Image (cartoon, rainbow, N blue to C red):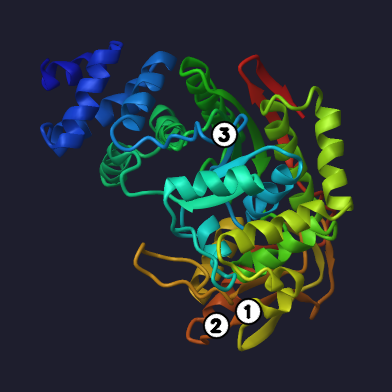
Amino acid sequence: MSTVELIRKKRDGGTLTTEEIHYLIQGYTKGNIPDYQMAAWAMAVFYRGMSDKETADLTMAMAQSGEQVDLSMIEGIKVDKHSTGGVGDTTTLVLGPLVAAAGVPVAKLSGRGLGHTGGTIDKLESIRGFSTEMEISEFTRLVNKSKIAVMGQTADLTPADKKLYALRDVTATVDSIPLIASSIMSKKIAAGADAIVLDVKTGDGAFMKDEEDAIRLAQAMVAIGKHVDRTTVAVVSDMSQPLGFAVGNAIEVKEAIDTLKGEGPADLTELSLVLGTQMLLLSGKYGSPEDARQTLEQCIRDGSALEKLKEFIAGQHGDPAQIEHPERLPQPKEKIPVPAETEGIVQAIQAEEVGLCAMKLGAGRATKEDPIDHAVGIILHKKIGDPVKKGETLATLYVNQTTALEEVKKRLIRAIHIQNRPASPPALIRCLVTADGVLRM
């Protein structure tokens, strides 16, 4: 095959075959196709798009470019959940033990945070001793024993995606729905999922700011799932303001514990129940959404979800006493209130800016090499639609280093828009996307 001919074919609007896509991905991964040719192909895809079958073929080619995790030794259907990223998105910490308590295995490969979005592993490592470093044999043993384990992604998982994403990042071809969808789904498929529930965020703090773009991305990923025999559903949810009240690492763990006690924020609780319901349905163990949701609610009420969290943490060498006593989680040197400068009603909260403020305090990374301070972050005290008095605390900063403190205060105040007119919080759940279509909520 000729790489130039394949670039020309896609440039002119043609459809690549399975063999042609595999030729491109294998050649690029092995170094036989140079960056400049792959960049030209990515730009052609950016402008011409890909068919559902092409996108599915690209997904499988990237999934097969490296290690593929074999979870066949785990009993039952393995349902994975993936979020496209947001601010204060603590759902995995709630969902994992909640779904496991309902009897469905949760075998999750997770990553670390970068930029304004937090990583599940970073949050879990707030717990003393907790480790995600293990062999697949130990991972499967833990899931069979406790119904839940979280492991770090291996370096050999989807090397083609890592290489192609780095190229897209420097050639202005990141914002292509087929390339985004195949990137996400290739990792889920390589990680051994039988079925996949996607939480596709939309709004200021999301990658997809526009709701219709988020729906198109959800449809593309669901279509990939259909083509490669992985039942996939997507929930499009709001990220126009942070989810819950906590943005950080240890403080998000605390918020997850509160949620599993039935004392968490309404939006985090509801999204966890919606996503958890879909996970239980895809497991094949529950016949209706009503039965699935009632089971999850019962697991919170009877304490079994919280007990499952302790079991999960202990199984991976963490200290379960910190779950019973969250005050033993990493604590900051100072907790600094940020008062409102005006009176009115919260109209908007720029979620991405709040995430960047938390990153400035040390809760996130600007580069992959940056260290994480698990104790720091931001607790919001107001959400969209809430009334505010002048001088009332809008947020509390959890601080260890004061270098960026004044900058963070100013940015945070600017990020919370207050006016003297009514405002309603945005709808949390926008729609459910399945192979049958889009169901508006």
Question: For this view, does 296 lie left or right of residue 40?
Answer: right
Estimate the x, y position of residue 372 in percent, counting from the top left. 47, 71
Residue for badge 2: 405
Please name the residue that numbered disc 1 is placed on: 398
Disc 3 vs disc 1: which is toward the camera? 1
Mark with earlier residue (2, 1) = 1
Cα–Cα span, label 3 and label 2: 34 Å
Q: Earlier in the sequence, mark 3 or mark 1?
A: 3
Q: Position of residue 373 (x, y in %)?
A: 51, 75
Above or below — where is 69 with respect to 227? below
Identify which amino acid the numbered label 2 is placed on. Answer: Leu
At label 3, the amino acid type is Ala
Displayed quadrant of residue 199:
top right
The residue tagged 3 is: 214
- Mark 2 lies on a secondary structure that is helix
- Marks 3/2 in contact by CB < 8 Å: the verdict is no
One can see residue 285 in this view: yes
